Image (cartoon, rainbow, N blue to C red):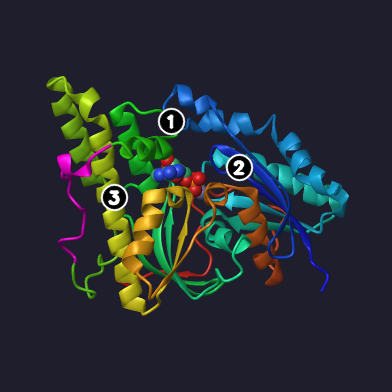
Amino acid sequence: MNELMVLGIESSCDETSVALLKGESSILGHSILSQDVHRIYGGVVPELAARAHLPVLDDVVRSALEPSGTSLSQVDALGVTAGPGLVGALLVGVCWAKAAAYALDRPLVPVHHMEAHLFAPSLEDPEAQPPFVALLVSGGHTLLLHAEEWGRYRLLGETRDDAAGEAFDKVAKTLGLPYPGGPSVEKAARKGDPARHPFPRPMLHRNQSPDDPAYCDVSFSGLKTAVAVRVEELRAEGRLEAERAHVAAAFQEAAIDTLVSKTLRGVEATGCTRVLLGGGVSANRALREEMGRRLGSGGRVFLASPRLSMDNGAMIARAAAFRLSLGETAEPELNADASLPFPGLERRSA
Ligand code: KG4
Ligand code: ZN
């Protein structure tokens, strides 16, 4: 079989990334450039993110092609994140990809960023294929879904408010820990004792029946507020410095307990014991370990390496190759869509 070479382009948030993928899993070149400018503000500033993609995208493409000595004209197809994400940031990738596809006369495939996260583990593990229950946890989304096959997904649960990554980022800011928040909280938590600050487990003690529409939903705003209140108390008492790592550990434990418990409800509801973790938060080692431990030897957890758990062009190329195999290509008027609907996702009727 003649394996297609697909160039995947990702610019939905604060990573500019491009990969050249041959076939389903052979990554011939891959560059991920993380923007540093947001560090000064303690979070991603959308306008700055968009501007920072622009001057580097050409060079990121070049460095993805370089290792294999491939020229742009040898690429068979291009895939680009068309949404969801920050609209200005998305537009940079979409405009670049549209221009290149037109100039090269190659198909352009619009990719849904969260569907691409589902494909990331399969780049490293050929067995990371449906059926699986997937927990997708990123800065903008928290979704629990059942994938019966590629392209056919059923929503089991989602967040009622903040995304899991957003909660990590906001808690990091509250605690005065540096951007990016998730890795900072994880690092601080390693030195902390979670038992010192018992925080609530949102939506675990209510919504306990599988008939309840919120059975697999999560919510992080109450937990985030509980952390903020505790941090204010500790600050007033002059104990914040001493307790920071303990608060980080307690928040992380509560968030992970919630995510793992809800995933296990999804496993029980579907009878599917194959679990896939995707999105930036899935780089969290404590989450990875806890999921494996609680799923036990009767199940399997599929994970991407930390590099492929974060936003990257390789997963975009992989998702594009799949969509292209279904004959899906972009219309010339393709636009970035900050709230692009998840393709093939059947939502609950409740
Ligand atoms: O998937 P991703 O790279 O970008 C989006 O699609 O949003 O996810 C980014 C999110 C951020 O909120 C970041 O703080 C979080 O993933 N994250 C983590 C860790 N590494 C990244 N959260 C917890 N622990 C980590 N080690
Ligand atoms: Zn992402």
Q: Is residue 10 above or below residue 238?
A: below
Give the number of the disc on residue 327: none
Give the number of the disc on residue 255: 3
Pinpoint residue 207: horizontal percent, then vertical percent.
19, 65
17 lies left or right of 197: right
Which residue extends farthest bottom?
A: 271
Pointer 1: what residue?
Answer: 179
Label 3 neighbour load within 10 Å: few <14, some 14-19, many 20+: many
Q: Are marks 2 and 3 in contact (CB under 8 Å)?
A: no
Task: Say what secondary structure mark 1 lies in.
Answer: loop
- Label 2 or label 3, whichever lies nearer to me, is 3
Q: Residue at x 76, y 39 (%)?
A: 63
Q: Earlier in the sequence, mark 1 or mark 3?
A: 1
- Label 2 or label 1, whichever lies nearer to me, is 1
Q: State the residue in front, 94 or 153.
A: 153
Q: Which region is colored magenta?
A: 192-207
Can you see residue 197? Answer: no
Pointer 2: what residue?
Answer: 11
Q: CA distance from mark 2 to mark 1?
A: 19 Å
Picture quarter with the C terminus: bottom left
Is 257 part of what is drawn in magenta? no
